[in-house]
Amino acid sequence: MLAFLIQRVLQAIFVMVVVALIAFSLFHYVGDPVLNMVGQEATEADRAALRARLGLDQPLPIQFFQFIANAAQFEFGISYRSARPVTDMIVERLPATLELAIISAIFAVVMGIVLGIYTALNRGSWLSNFIMTASLIGVSLPTFLIGVLLIYLFAVELGWLPAFGRGQTVPVGDWWTTGLLTTSGLRSLILPAITLGLFQLTLIMRLVRAEMLEVLRADYIKFARARGLSKRVVNLRHALKNTLIPVITIIGLQLGTIIAFAIITETVFQWPGVGALFITAVRFVDIPVMAAYLMMIALVFVVINLIVDLLYYAVDPRLRVQGGAK
Amino acid sequence: MSDSQRVVTPLPKPSKLRAFLDSDIVYSWKRQPVVILATLVTLVMFAAALLAPWIAPQNPFDPRQLDLIDAFTPPLTTSDFTGNFYLLGSDSQGRDVFSAILYGSRISLLVGFAAVLFALVLGTSLGLLAGFRGGWRDALIMRIADVQLTFPSILMALLIFGVVRGFLPRSMHAEVAIIVLIVAIGLSDWVQYARAVRGATLVEKGKEYVQAARVIGLPARNILFQHILPNVMRPVLVIGTIGLALAIIAEATLSFLGVGMPATQPSLGTLIRVGQDYMFSGEWWILLFPGLALLMLALSVNLLGDWLRDVLNPKLR
């Protein structure tokens, strides 16, 4: 257990250091940060003073260490484009991204499991076939195209739902603003959440269906039927429970994917989240914002993977016997 | 004449073409109408992209051929002003949407193929190296692969694109966009090839023909490229076909986000991004037709890839 844990944690740290190195070198090889900050009329002495104040006259390893120390305190400097602290910009946009990600994850998980069970139990019915075919198209369709088509249908043609933005938001606590408490906020959330969740939905549905079909063939299900248990109990209590173990791990892994794909959805719907901020930063080569996002997304992924690995370990006893060797 | 005296003439060896037509692949192809349809759509779209300069009614990027007065002509309409016919309508510049799609799919396919080739060569080489040499090289390459697999490839492509762009001077961005895009998508997708090739190499390495080649003293390079490589290519080709659909989608996504191909050299993704602006004012065709073209392309290449995977290597499923 301990060896496994240490190995995973070391790997996580290794990833973070590599990402930090990339982010750090972005800062230091893309032009002179001092030139970016002072005006043209600054003298050489001013520049040297600023360089010393920023610690840029130190040797590179010390600067890198300083960068990591700052990053650990969520300190990424000032955006080149809007001249505001990057941390503030990210923090004020975080609620929008998290609300979108969580709602679409719930949508994907609930609908995915329900549709997966339905298509497994009613194999060959026309509705199942329709759902399966539709899911194949859903997998092939790029996320942004789904979003654009949904906007066209529901916002432009039918006029039912807003096409962009987050609607009205209300503050909750010190820094969190939520769109979940207003009608316009909820209405604005529907299309982006469907767009973001659709891919995960098809994935979860196909997985649940495949696992369910496998489990339904098992002997203990036959035995449960032979005992005269009702269909409902057999299907939902005996079969579903055993289906869910692999499904839960996939859902865990997909959480990171949802956050990644939020970049696309946020851009399509002009959703004021962190992903849209990152895209703008890439377009305008706003390096502090890029570096901060890079570190943030890497941290999210590393933490999720670590948790999933540990969950695996807890759920699957075979890993324990082999001493953590995968 | 009794049976025993009859001279047995061996069947003539079937010609290469005949052998191909009788193979499992063709048999399975003929039995699946969806796959036949996907092949046809793919071939037509490839041909249309390749022949764009000859079949497109106009060159959409030659300003002399555009008539601003024809802007926003609806589909299937002949312009009242110039008498030009617009099959799929025209955009804000009077550019024929049909021609723009032909030229756009050319760029989409170019980036897709190049990115897949890049990923394929890189992944196969690293996979061969890891599988054949083992040791620390294997450990290092596979560790990197593990790490990269934890990030979705579209995010990886986006991050690589952003980082590479950050290192390049601003004035070069538009010119080298296509190369940066190819490298970013290629780098985001090599892991699959490396893993498959490494696994296959490990299996092949222990087989007798490789031992025999070693015994007769062939240099490692020859064994690797002439003996092992041909035997590990099957999964690579399957992954490559599926990878093509993914690369086309990745390119379209990046271009749609405004961080891929610039508007002066639009791919299908760029066209969709531009079209989105006109969706609200009623010019739906500028958005919808490039979208449909991308959908058809991605869907049919995907179907072909899935089919090929099932035929060639059911284990990869």
Image: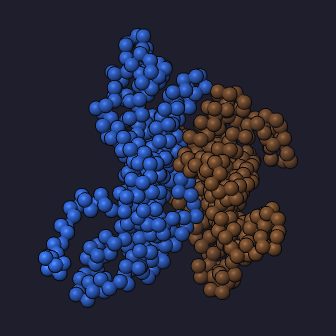
Chain colours: A brown, B blue
Task: Look at the image and tell me whether residue B160 can be seen.
Answer: yes
Q: Residue at the far bottom: name it.
A: B215
Quadrant the N terminus of chain B occupies: bottom left
Viewer-nearest residue: A126 or A198 = A126
Q: How many marks?
A: 0
Q: Residue at x 41, y 70 (%)?
A: B197
**Residue B90: where, in percent of width, then height?**
45, 23
Q: Residue at the far right: name it.
A: A173
Viewer-nearest residue: B294 or B160 = B294
Task: Locate residue A296: give its quadrant.
Answer: bottom right
Q: Residue at x 45, y 26 (%)?
A: B88
Q: Does B215 sit left or right of A218 as displayed?
A: left
Q: Residue at x 33, y 35 (%)?
A: B52
**Looking at the image, is A75 positioned above or below residue B199?**
above
**Looking at the image, is B281 positioned above or below residue B210?**
above
Q: Does B102 sit left or right of A276 as displayed?
A: left
Task: Look at the image and tell me whether residue A76 can be seen.
Answer: no
Q: Residue at the far front: name it.
A: B1
Viewer-nearest residue: B27 or A111 = B27
Q: Does A119 sit left or right of B197 as displayed?
A: right
**Residue A75: where, in percent of width, then height?**
68, 56
**Looking at the image, is B232 positioned above or below residue A151?**
below
**Residue A214: where, in percent of width, then height?**
65, 68
**Looking at the image, is B24 positioned above or below residue B80?**
below
**Residue B208: where, in percent of width, then height?**
32, 85
Task: Locate residue B99: give its quadrant.
Answer: top left
Viewer-nearest residue: A290 or B276 = B276
Q: Residue at x 54, y 64 (%)?
A: B149
